[in-house]
């Protein structure tokens, strides 16, 4: 029996990879424009990092981690998300000694053991960014701008930014008391998950997807009701800056992000026309996290988005993706002498920066022209004994269906000229 890839993984093969590359190019481009530098951290880390950095009460840590003992009896986990690793790297590499804030982005595979279903992968890919060492609300606004701009550039439609403030440990303690008071008599009607949350993390009951929980908590106090002066001011300033940037945001007091360490600003971007689970990006401020995993007290904020999800939304919204693929020059050579000359020419053209290929299987002329067609060649250079003897080459323009003879020593200049003119 042939070996198959593990459940929940995918091969991204030619024909599909172009979309990924397009997306990745756009990501790198916009991050560089916004002054974010790339960071690459290991795909596995000490399990404790995620237990402390993502939080013991989260589904990620409780149910979804790929954890194993390595041969040195260390508990290792394949990273389920990027933020904890970036914060660890910030501390370990003493990035706090650099000019602050440090703005970084990452792009790469993440691993979660999820129930296998359409659109859910156990190895999936995320683009995320983190800003460490900046507590000003302008940081919050800028990172939301980056996301907004990015989605605009790749052509997504019907987007809404939802923002909320979940407060700081001080004002959240107040909220927790008020919420528990409110829920006390309704507790037994909550879903099992929420009954569990009632003591562990009651705030999360507010964003339960269960409709009866939503109804029960309709008039529950939100974190906005109990914001302290500092948090309220931060939230107001963030909105002011978003207004200046012209971002269409909506305040959603029930939006509570899933991770334990969020503070103050939380945000999500939703897209229309993709069904109920319409969030395509989420993030928030996590001022306590770096310290939680053993670093110096450092404010931080970040977001992450799943690339599989973005690509599927682009498909659902019929967004045209036009990866710029330059049509190659194909050399069709007949006979060994011509093949050798063709092989030499191939190197010349590639040196000049032109994509160029030739048949590698020793096909006849007809087969080579078919090959050129499938490669979507713009030009085919035909080279046989006769042309070789006269130091000429036949250039066939596949788009116009015309051909002409050009001296071999002028072919490079001819192609450079003609491919440039099309730009
Ligand atoms: Zn507060
Ligand atoms: Zn619930």
Image (cartoon, rainbow, N blue to C red):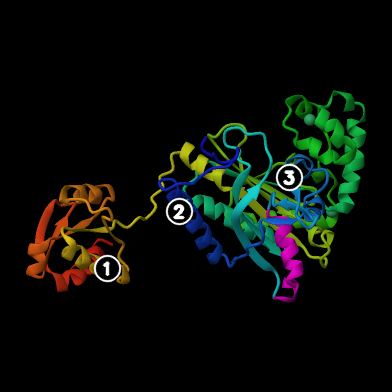
Rendered view: 410 above or below 229? below
* SS at mark 1 in the image: helix
Q: Say which residue label 2 marks.
A: 22
Q: Residues within 10 Å of mark 3 (few under 14, many from 20)?
A: many
Q: Which corner quadrant of the image does residue 58 belong to? A: top right
- Magenta span has 96? yes
Residue at 66% of width from left, 47% of height from top? Answer: 111
Q: Give the percent coordinates (x, y) of residue 263.
A: 79, 53
Residue that carries the numbered disc 3 in the rendered image: 65
Look at the picture and state if 67 lies above or below 341.
above
* Mark closer to the chain start, 3 or 1: 3
Indicate which disc, 3 or 2, sits on the residue closer to the N terminus. Answer: 2
**In the image, residue 396 lies at what x, y percent?**
15, 56
Q: Residues within 10 Å of mark 1 (few under 14, many from 20)?
A: some
Q: CA distance from mark 1 to mark 2?
A: 25 Å
Q: Is residue 309 above or below residue 364?
A: above
**Which residue range is magenta in the image?**
82-98
Q: Is residue 135 visible?
A: no
Look at the image and tell me in which quarter the C terminus lies: bottom left
Q: Which residue is mark 1?
A: 349
Ligand 1: quadrant of the figure: bottom right
Residue 401 x/y as whole percent: 13, 51
Q: Which mark is residue 73?
A: none
In which quadrant of the rendered view does residue 342 lie? bottom left
Depth-wise, is mark 3 or mark 2 nearer the camera?
3
């Amino acid at each position: 029996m042939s070996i198959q890839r593990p459940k929940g993984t995918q091969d991204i093969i030619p024909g599909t990879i172009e979309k990924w590359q397009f997306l990745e190019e756009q990501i790198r481009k916009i991050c560089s424009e916004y002054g974010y530098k790339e960071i690459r951290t290991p795909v596995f880390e000490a399990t404790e990092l995620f237990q402390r950095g993502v939080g013991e009460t989260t589904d990620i840590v409780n149910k979804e981690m790929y954890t194993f003992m390595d041969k040195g009896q260390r508990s290792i986990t394949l990273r389920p998300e990027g933020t904890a690793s970036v914060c660890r790297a910030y501390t370990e590499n003493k990035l706090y000694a650099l000019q602050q804030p440090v703005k970084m982005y990452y792009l790469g595979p993440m691993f979660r053991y999820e129930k296998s279903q359409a659109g859910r992968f156990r190895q999936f890919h995320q683009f995320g960014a983190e800003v460490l060492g900046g507590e000003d609300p302008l940081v919050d606004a800028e990172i939301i701008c980056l996301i907004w701009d990015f989605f605009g550039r790749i052509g997504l439609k019907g987007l809404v930014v939802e923002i909320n403030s979940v407060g700081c440990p001080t004002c959240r303690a107040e909220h927790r008391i008020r919420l528990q008071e409110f829920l006390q008599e309704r507790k037994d009607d909550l879903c099992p998950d929420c009954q569990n949350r009632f003591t562990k993390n009651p705030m999360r009951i507010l964003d339960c997807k269960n409709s009866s929980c939503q109804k029960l908590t309709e008039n529950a106090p939100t974190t906005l009701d109990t914001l302290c002066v500092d948090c309220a001011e931060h939230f107001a300033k963030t909105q002011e800056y978003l207004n200046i940037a012209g971002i269409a945001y909506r305040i959603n007091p029930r939006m509570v992000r899933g991770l334990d360490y969020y503070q103050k600003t939380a945000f999500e971007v939703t897209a229309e026309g993709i069904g109920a689970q319409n969030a395509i990006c989420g993030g928030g401020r996590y001022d306590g996290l770096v310290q939680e995993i053993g670093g110096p007290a450092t404010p931080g904020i970040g977001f992450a988005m799943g690339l599989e999800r973005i690509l599927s939304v682009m498909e659902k919204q019929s967004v045209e993706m036009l990866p710029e693929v330059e049509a190659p020059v194909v050399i069709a050579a007949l006979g060994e002498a011509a093949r050798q000359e063709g092989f030499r020419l191939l190197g010349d053209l590639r040196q000049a920066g032109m994509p160029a290929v030739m048949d590698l299987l020793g096909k006849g002329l007809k087969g080579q022209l078919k090959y050129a067609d499938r490669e979507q060649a713009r030009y085919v250079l035909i080279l046989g004994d006769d042309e070789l003897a006269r130091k000429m080459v036949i250039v066939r323009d596949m788009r116009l269906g015309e051909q002409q003879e050009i001296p071999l020593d002028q072919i490079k200049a001819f192609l450079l000229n003609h491919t440039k003119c099309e730009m």
